[in-house]
Image: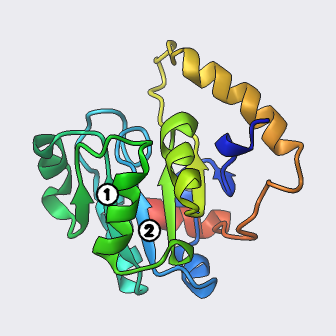
Amino acid sequence: MFRRFYPYAYTRSVFSIDYAKLRDKGFRAVIFDIDNTLVHHGDNSTPQVDALFRNIHKIGLKTLLLTNNDEERVQRFIKNIDTLYICDAEKPQPAAYLKALKMLGVGKEEAVCIGDQMFIDIVGANRCGIPNILVHFIQLPNEKHIGKKRYIEKVILWFYRRNKKYRSRLGDIYIKKEDKNALEQG
């Protein structure tokens, strides 16, 4: 019933993913959402995110930002990041996901999409057959209102965690805690 919403993997943040493990599993590219995936909604990139992209590129993976944001927002975000991007993507429609694969020069099985929204990022990737990772959305400490869709996502995640067939389809892609702390420090 919910499988079109199920991610291939679910983790706390983009910093808890071991990108070298993804590369070793045959992935050649990472497609990222921006807002509430890499930074809080509307924020500029951080030194930690800039370092994350440098590390991903250093290990040989390509990157692309796939966002429903406009060009001005994307340009502000990538000030210190060398990456491809597609703005005004109209996610979860498949067209931008397929365009991203073409721009990256990879097949569906060689890319992984990472985003925070089940109904947009994950559904779009699933529609195209692209492996994906759902990260917990970035929320400020005093932020209480999360929106109705986030509560529905919690229910779907409850079912996802109990369904062994769909859970953790990418295997062990997680970083050790001590490595995660070092990565977040830049």
- The residue positioned 79% from the left and 35% from the top of the image is 1
The quadrant of the picture occupied by the C terminus is bottom left
Q: How is the image coloured?
A: rainbow
| Location of residue 32 in the rendering, given as x and y in whole percent from the top left corner | 40, 56
- The residue positioned 40% from the left and 86% from the top of the image is 60
- The residue positioned 75% from the left and 26% from the top of the image is 155
Position above or below: 85 against 91 = below
The image shows a total of numbered marks equal to 2
Q: Badge 1 is on which residue?
A: 65
**N-term mark: 2 or 1:** 2
| Location of residue 147 in the rendering, given as x and y in whole percent from the top left corner | 51, 16
Q: Secondary structure at mark 2?
A: strand
Q: Using a 10 Å C-alpha cutoff, classify the residue at mark 2 as few (fewer than 14 neighbours), some (14 to 19) or many (20 or more).
A: many
> Is 53 positioned to the left or the right of 25 in the image?
left
- Residue type marked 1: Leu
Mark 2 vs mark 1, CA separation in Å: 9 Å
> Is 139 positioned to the left or the right of 51 in the image?
right
- The residue positioned 25% from the left and 55% from the top of the image is 86
Q: Badge 2 is on which residue?
A: 30
- Disc ID at residue 31: none
- Residue type marked 2: Val
